[in-house]
Amino acid sequence: MALLITDADIGGRRRDLWVDGGRIVHPGTPTDVIDARGGAVLPGFTDHHLHLHALAAARRCVHAGRSRDDLATALRHTAPDPTGWIRVVGSDDDLLDATTLDRIRPDVPVRVQHRSGAMWVLNSAALTRIGPLDHPGLDRDPDGTPTGRLHRGDDWLRDRLPRSDPPDVRELGRELAGYGITAVTDATPDLDDAAISSLTAVPQRLTLLGVALGSAPPPGTEAGPYKIVLADSDLPDPDELAARIREAHAAGRPVAVHSVTRESLILLLVALEAADRLPGDRIEHAALVPDELRSALRGLVVVTQPGFIADRGDLFRRGTPPEEHADLYRCGSLRAAGVSVRLSSDAPYGPVDPWLVLRAATTRRTPDGSTLGPAEVLTPREAMDALTGVAGPRTLRPGDPADLVLLHVPLDEALRVPDRALVRTTFIDGRQP
């Protein structure tokens, strides 16, 4: 389809745009015409870090709410899924345990995922179903009794659950397109062939961090930096981490290393110093960056999530020492230090809406209305650059991919009050999903 978009705000100027063969082209003869009516046309958003299967599954799960009363109400009114289990997502409760869940819903196996994605809590029925409790991340009381809390045990738990097909991500892909998202990076580590195949159903351009070293991704997708998770409950020694980084680099892959604490960040920097850096090496989250380490991140890409500030910044403030508040999910000070910053959602663990992420990056406002880390704000243009991966004026040129978002209003107006309702339509490879 040869498309002409007329009267569009592009780079601050009103002009027409021709699209054909998935690319922006020189003026030609269109088969279809859309009048932009002065609305902005800009490069589509990229979600640089999310988990597609987990997000699709979360759409079918029980949500924990903000209190144990909310959780109890949800569990008591929920029937088990076809496998006989109840899955709950989005819990903020660090102290939830099997005993508490047994008081609420003892009759069926229940698993509750912490909203960080790093912990599951299982009731006694679930613990009984999953067999030998031999994972090192399974928390126990002093007498050895399992508390039900399982840290960083996703793969171990998945292997013990009733078998089910990967979630269908096609509807999710259409939802993401509705936000203006035209490219996604799935950050789930260690993907198997079935999971990778099912992820290709999204219409977005797809990058996968979890492709095994030496493996080729499916046609039309890209193997991104190799994902390494630094679990704070079981950190490797620097030599071990450096060896993993060298292995990825030798395979031609940068690394994408999960770091959410000061300790894991220091470990990573030491390992990178020993292994040498490769262009494209990334730090996923960089949730806590002490001021004295900012300059050490220069040359790396930081993929962070200011949406967490909007979603649960009040909880961060209460749960983090005051002297570390300025270190949380830095953005502005990293840019000032010459660090390349990309924004993402980490959905389903953070809000998936890129317009909410943009607002969070420019205001740092928490749910209780206060500001967390005011020195870390980005300008609206800086936040847009970090969401699209396109810096500077958005002067779309012939040859550029036709991965585009058409807004109802000019860009300057959209950036004053960013909202998903401003998206009129999205084009991926020149087509509307």
Image (cartoon, helix red, strand yellow):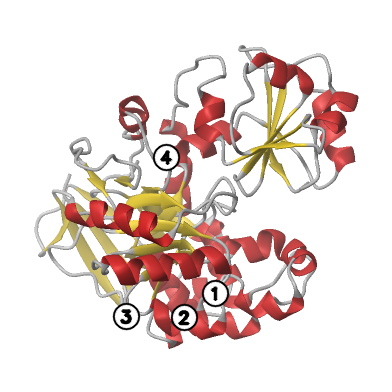
Q: Is residue 74 left or right of residue 160?
A: right
- Disc on the earlier residue, 1 or 2: 1
**In the rendering, at what x and y percent does residue 375 appear?**
60, 85
- Where is 146 relative to 210, above or below? above
Q: Please give the name of the residue rendered at 50% of the width and 22% of the height, measured from the top-left corner.
A: 159
Q: Is residue 3 left or right of residue 417?
A: left
Give how far apart the Cα atoms at labels 2 and 4 are.
31 Å
Q: How many marks?
A: 4
Q: Mark number for residue 173?
A: 4
Disc 4, SS? helix
- Disc on the earlier residue, 1 or 4: 4
* Amino acid carrying mark 1 in the image: Val
Q: Please give the name of the residue rendered at 25% of the width and 47% of the height, measured from the top-left corner.
A: 223
For the N terminus, the image quarter is top left
Circle 1 residue: 289
**In the rendering, at what x and y percent does residue 43 appear?**
32, 63
- Where is 6 relative to 78, above or below? below
Give the crowd class for mark 4: few <14, some 14-19, many >=20 residues within 10 Å: many
Query: Which is in the foreground here, disc 2 or disc 4?
Result: 2
Query: Which is in the foreground here, disc 2 or disc 3?
Result: 2
Circle 2 residue: 334
* Amino acid carrying mark 3 in the image: Gly
Disc 3, SS? loop
In this view of the protein, which residue sits in the foreground, 29 or 163? 163
Disc 2, SS? helix
Give how far apart the Cα atoms at labels 1 and 4 are.
33 Å
